[in-house]
Image: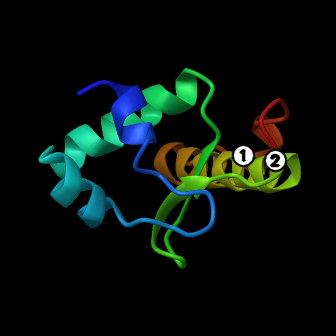
Amino acid sequence: MKETEIVKLIPWDRFISRAELVKQTGLSDRRVREHIERARRAGYRIISNTKQGGYKFAESGKEWSEFVAAERRRAIATFKRATGIPEDQLPGLV
């Protein structure tokens, strides 16, 4: 299955769970995540939200920007926890 095939299953108006994508595609959970990431790298603006439960296309540039900013914050927080590097030593990241 190509990323473009999984993209066809992702809605614009609601979130679809990864479990549903696994069910519809027959791919493993890990493979679904890999396909989503490759589709994003290919330029598809797919957002995810654990509170809403799943994936959907960003409906606006603002929604996409908010998703990217939240992902960046999450990545920085994870990096800081994993390395123990003080925030003042991460000027290019924070």
Q: Which mark is residue 18?
A: none
Q: Mark 2 points at which residue?
A: 65
* Mark 1 crowd level (few <14, some 14–19, many ≥20, 10 Å Cα): some
Q: Nearer the viewer, residue 23 or 30?
A: 23
Residue at 44% of width from left, 26% of height from top?
A: 38
Q: Quarter of the image containing the N terminus?
A: top left
The type of residue carrying mark 1 is Val
Badge number at residue 68: 1
User: Is residue 35 found left or right of 63 in the rendered image?
Assistant: left
Quick one: 73 or 36, which is closer to the camera? 36
Residue drawn 53% across the image and 78% down it: 51
Q: Which residue lies furthest to the front in this view?
A: 8
Question: Vertically, is 14 above or below 18?
Answer: below
Residue 93 in the image, given as x and y percentages of width and height: 77, 36
The outermost residue toward the bottom is 51
**Disc 2 residue type (three-letter):** Ser
